[in-house]
Image (cartoon, grey):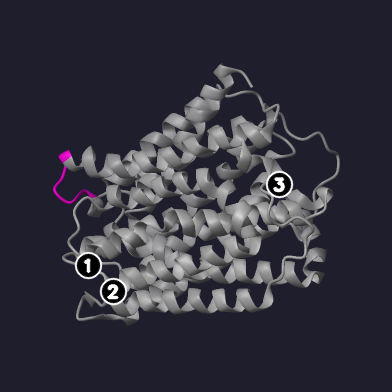
Amino acid sequence: MTARIYSQLSLMMFLQFFIWGAWFVTLGTYLAGIGFSGTQIGTAYLTNNIGAIVAPFLVGLIADRFFAAEKVMGILHIAGAVVLYFVSDLTSAGAIITGLLLYNICYMPTLALVNTVSFNVMDTPDSEFPRVRVWGTLGWICAGLSISFLLSGFTTNVEASTYPMCMAAGASLLLGLFSFFLPHTPPKMTKEKPTLGEILGADALGMLKDRSFAIFALCSLLISIPLAFYYAFTNLYLNDMGIADAAAKMSLGQMSEVAFMVLMPFFFRRLGVKWMLLVGMLAWAARYAFFASGDADDLIWMIYGGILLHGVCYDFFFVTGQVYVDQKAPKANRASAQGFIALLTYGVGLAIGSTLAGMTVEAMTVDGVRHWANIWWVPCVFAGAVAVMFSLLFKDERGNTNEPTAALTD
């Protein structure tokens, strides 16, 4: 991979996740400010998960077979920019939720397309892709910092405004135009139409006969349910607690994600896959316990601690899980297995979680006051129960459980 291509891919990945971080983090605060109930906020975030479920169909049936990936990505980002800009001007719940659904159907397929464009031009993906992907995390961090320190100059309560959505729409338009200048990534030359099972990763279903993989798949789905509470309501929680520049402070979680990604090979050698996964699950429970117990005064360190645990929560479970699947699955079924787990987590699990989170917040809102301690104990207990089940039932019977993959060691 040449320096020029590396620069192109890095900018692409930066903008890809800058867009997501710009509108996704503060959406709950904005919607609450215009009168959305907890259930309606949960439904708004559910549109993102529906987009994740639809994405494999769009990529598998269209992008992979007929058109160059960079051109499909460009069209989707431009269309998404237009949709998101119009959504920022809407006021009714039904119209906003419908608009967000259309937007997420445009955006979520591009997560797979940026990977397709990247892998197509890489000589050694195991070592090259992490150096490109890290720019996505940096993009998310910069989105949070931009909201708190740049957009705040335009309005007093920027996180409850439409400015973050407009910024995301502008970045989406920029990436859409830039996509047409990315390395050419032609469609897969195949005459056979992919089956529904291939698109959904059903080739990996045979792996569920393995008890440990089945437990891992089930726990991956279940742990994604409490994860949705964090994505949908943390920014609103921080604003309710009176913590200034909440979006920027939430970006500390992505900073810790980068730090723990660097440290993962060290932990792999000492803990192995099972304990890495278990620590990741327990970190979710600890995070929500910190949120439930913290405040904006003497115990504010607990809130910051919960945010900083994001690196452990995400890297130790989700990244380790990808490594486990890659090592567990037969070579011919690796892509299918990864797609299947992604569908369980980012699709089904987070969809259930978004709905449950919205219902929980609404049930624990009395006279317009959200009782956050009670709200956070729900995902805390849920994550703890999943961790206990995993620790009792999961056994990693692979021959070499402590060796990280090349992607983690380069």
| Residue 61 place in picture, x, y as percent | 72, 46
Tell me which label, 3 or 2, sits earlier in the chain: 3
Q: Is residue 112 magenta?
A: no
Proximity of marks 1 and 2: CB atoms separated by less than 8 Å: yes
Residue located beneath label 1 in the image: 299
Q: Which residues are magenta?
A: 153-158
Residue located beneath label 2 in the image: 293
- Secondary structure under tag 3 reads helix
| Residue 256 place in picture, x, y as percent | 41, 49
| Residue 128 place in picture, x, y as percent | 62, 31
**Is the C terminus in the top left, top right, bottom left or bottom right quadrant?**
top right
Tell me which label, 1 or 3, sits earlier in the chain: 3
Residue type at the position of mark 1: Leu
Q: Is residue 328 left or right of residue 306?
A: right
- Secondary structure under tag 2 reads helix
Task: Return the residue found at the far front.
Answer: 270
| Gap between marks 3 and 2 measured at Cα | 45 Å
**Is the N terminus in the top left, top right, bottom left or bottom right quadrant?**
top right
| Gap between marks 1 and 3 measured at Cα | 49 Å
Above/below status of 348 relative to 14: below
| Gap between marks 1 and 2 measured at Cα | 8 Å
